Image (cartoon, rainbow, N blue to C red):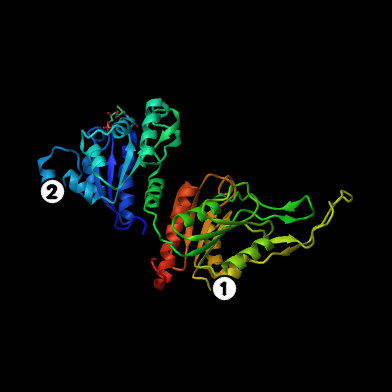
Amino acid sequence: MGLANKHIVLGVTGGIAAYKSAELARRLRDRGARVRVVMTKGAEHFITPLTMQAVSSNPVHTSLLDPDAEAGMGHIELARWADAMLIAPATANFISRLAHGAADDLLTTLCLATPVAISVAPAMNQQMWRDQATQDNIEILRKRGILILGPAEGDQACGDIGPGRMLEPDELLAALSGSFRSGMLENVKVVVTAGPTWEAIDPVRGITNHSSGKMGYAVAEAAAENGARVTLVSGPTGLPRPDNVHTIRVTSAQEMYDAAMEETAAGDIFIAVAAVADYRPATAAEQKIKKRSDTLTIELIRNPDILTAVAKRGLLFTAGFAAETNSVEMHAREKLTSKGVDLIAANLVGGGEGFGTEDNSLMLIDKTDTKTLPRMRKSLLARRLIEEIAERYHAKNPTQGPR
Ligand SMILES: Cc1cc2nc3c(=O)[nH]c(=O)nc-3n(C[C@H](O)[C@H](O)[C@H](O)COP(=O)(O)O)c2cc1C
């Protein structure tokens, strides 16, 4: 599962971001992948083959017409060895040569000779990226089924600001492992809750929170991409229903509880991502409350705890999100025990973190370990999380699969 034991050919081309390729190779190896690096002549101006050899623990390939290499790991052999190819960084020049079927160096020849998936992480000045020639070349690659990872927007080495930054190594890893998505959760029923809840005070007012639902929707999508049968129980959000996911829309915590209990009656994995209100008004006024007195007291009563209730049902795996504003790990560990769940995915919220943002980081806490998934886009983070959950689910239930 994931990248463990996968054979990755990492292509490095001649851009400033090549310095990040060393970190990328190291992280690939940390994730259990075997890495062989192929560098263009241009790349050698930015990072040495010696560095890439050290971090990949394998000889680096730089030349197509190398009699020694042809006797050992020649280009056809290397093409056959690969489970996937990742070109990071990919220069405008390389993208152009790939789009037009060039085979005038080892990397382009390999790309033609390999039947496996090719992912390309463009990295260049924003104007080079925006140029019509580059955009046309990217379109050609996309049509050919080549995965284009990024680029990200932001400050550039040349001082410009705009699109063209290479994605960070962790984002590339998440996307690459996503390209190996398989039936990790085939035939597994996964129930996910997402979004905020709305606790009515009267017909026009209510108590809610800033949860956007983006993370929960991304988790539901990632589970479905991995073959799971997914039900998403969603509080009020403006998000479209994800593809291949059975979506049930609810409003209040009580409705979310009822739907979650019904759906998990025959579920395997429950992932509670929703930000559920702990309390609701004891009674919701039937008519709009009028402005009569200087103060108004609303009595609140406890809502049922959905995660604790589902965990008691003895599903094969339960995971919950914990949004904390301080002492994240300590509070998350308390939740792991008090709620009796298998995994807590904790994140820091408030001060511009977590709710409503496009990216996030997570601390995964289970009975034996704490692991951090670094900041990345929520869609990529969700894929990484599903991978982590699938691994733990299969380890806990060896008779269930991998299916
Ligand atoms: C200092 C410097 C930085 C460069 N950075 C980039 C870059 O980030 N992205 C890019 O597409 N080209 C960049 N180039 C241009 C490429 O190095 C050039 O197009 C080269 O021919 C690429 O060769 P390759 O694609 O075979 O590796 C840079 C050139 C120089 C001199």
Q: Name the secondary structure under disc 1.
A: loop
Q: Identity of the amino acid at label 1?
A: Arg
Residue 249: image tag = none
Q: Is mark 1 within 8 Å of ligand 1?
A: no
Q: Identity of the amino acid at label 2?
A: Gly
Q: Name the secondary structure under disc 2.
A: loop
- Give the residue displayed 46% in from the left and 56% down from the top: 385
Left or right of residue 148, residue 339 in this image: right
* Residue linked to disc 1: 313
- Give the residue displayed 39% in from the left and 68% down from the top: 401
Left or right of residue 10, residue 338 in this image: right
**Image location of residue 290, percent across then percent down:** 87, 50
Cα–Cα gap, marks 2 and 1? 57 Å
- Can the viewer see residue 187 in this picture? yes
* Residue linked to disc 2: 72
The crowd level at tag 2 (other Cα within 10 Å; few <14, some 14-19, many 20+) is few
Between residues 64 and 302, which one lies in front from this camera angle?
64
Residue 280 sits above or below residue 357 on the image: below
**Image location of residue 155, percent across then percent down:** 44, 33
Between residues 119 and 392, which one lies in front from this camera angle?
119
Between residues 55 and 268, which one lies in front from this camera angle?
268
Residue 221 sits above or below residue 168 on the image: below
- The quadrant in which the C terminus is found is bottom left
User: Ligand 1: which quarter?
Assistant: top left
Q: Earlier in the sequence, mark 2 or mark 1?
A: 2
- Give the residue displayed 21% in from the left and 38% down from the top: 106
Left or right of residue 249, residue 385 in this image: left
The crowd level at tag 1 (other Cα within 10 Å; few <14, some 14-19, many 20+) is few
**Image location of residue 88, percent across then percent down:** 33, 40
**Image location of residue 100, percent across then percent down:** 29, 31
